[in-house]
Amino acid sequence: MSLHMDRVGAIIAREAAVFILREAGPDSLITVTRTIVSSSGDHVSVLLTVLPEDKTQSALTFLSRQREAFSDHLKKRSRLSPLPRVDFQLDSGEKSRQRLDELSNEL
């Protein structure tokens, strides 16, 4: 990935964290773990973890409903042009890593 794509991912991750902190309710802890930028730069996946885990689906539903508001937030707070399409997804890799940590601590 190019330096430009790395920067785009970092900007979107930072702004997603700010947006989620401001807009999400206190029912769950939503953490931005990383971003995946498409090779063309027109699509970005923001990967998240949600605690407690039973709030995961409601958090993803909330964020998918807020996609347009997040785009407006990006327009105001960044100089990205054109704005990529942003999707919010659960970071299953992070969840697997946490499970491996739990298993290794049991040994």
Image (spheres, rainbow, N blue to C red):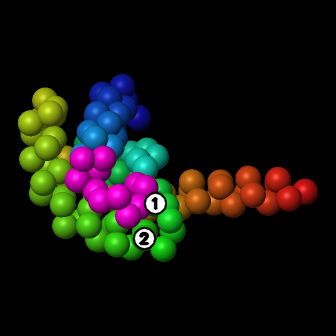
* Residue 80 position in % (x across, y down): 15, 34
Residue corresponding to mark 1: 50
Q: Secondary structure at mark 2?
A: helix
Q: Amino acid at mark 2?
A: Lys
* Residue 29 position in % (x across, y down): 43, 55
Q: Secondary structure at mark 1?
A: strand
* Residue 30 position in % (x across, y down): 40, 55
Residue corresponding to mark 2: 55
Magenta segment range?
20-30
Q: Earlier in the sequence, mark 1 or mark 2?
A: 1
Q: Amino acid at mark 1?
A: Val
- Residue 16 visible from this viewpoint: no
Count neighbours of disc 2 (C-alpha within 10 A) and say few if under 14, some if 14 to 19, many if 20 or more.
some
Q: Nearer the viewer, residue 71 or 1?
A: 71
Kindly identify the residue that appears in the image at 50 percent across and 65 percent down. 52
Residue farthest toward the front in the current orientation of the protein: 26
